[in-house]
Image (spheres, rainbow, N blue to C red):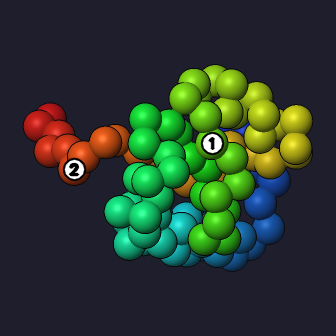
Amino acid sequence: MSGSPVFQDLAPGALSSLRDRFITDLLWLEKNLGRLRKAYTGKYVAVKDRRIVGSGADMRRLVASLRRRRLDANNLVIEYIPAADCIWVL
């Protein structure tokens, strides 16, 4: 990972902190999915610190909006909110 530009400037311990925040935000999103579906069905949402910090129907526009607000999409949970529960077969 040391050659990755995303992680090269992180202080020691910062990667585990980033991972922990990502997991916390992902679990928050999962727990609140039913409530979020009412407002964000068919949209992408960006989550930081258990709050929605952006949303939109188009991922590229959402990321551009986040950048304009100086939020790094690489450090956020961004998920699509489907109309109903989905089962993904990979």
Say above or below: 58 vs 83. above
**Residue 62 in view (yes/no):** yes
The answer to whether mark 2 and mark 1 are in CB contact below 8 A is no
Between discs 2 and 1, the one toward the N terminus: 1
Pinpoint residue 61: horizontal percent, then vertical percent: 68, 25
Pinpoint residue 76: horizontal percent, then vertical percent: 63, 53
> On the image, numbered disc 1 is attached to which residue?
55
Q: At x 14% / y 45%, what residue is drawn?
A: 87
Q: At x 24% / y 46%, what residue is drawn?
A: 84
Q: Is residue 70 left or right of residue 24?
A: right
| Disc 1, SS | strand
The disc label shown at residue 85, or none? 2
Say above or below: 86 vs 26. above
Q: Nearer the viewer, residue 25 or 53?
A: 53
Q: Is residue 47 left or right of residue 26?
A: right
Pinpoint residue 8: horizontal percent, then vertical percent: 75, 50
What amino acid is at disc 2? Asp
- Density class for disc 1 (Cα within 10 Å; few <14, some 14-19, many ≥20) is many
Q: Is residue 88 left or right of residue 5?
A: left
Q: Nearer the viewer, residue 14 or 36?
A: 36
- Density class for disc 2 (Cα within 10 Å; few <14, some 14-19, many ≥20) is few
Which part of the image, by quadrant, shows the C terminus?
Answer: top left
**Residue 3 in view (yes/no):** no
Pinpoint residue 21: horizontal percent, then vertical percent: 60, 71
Disc 2 and disc 1: Cα gap in Å? 19 Å
| Disc 2, SS | loop
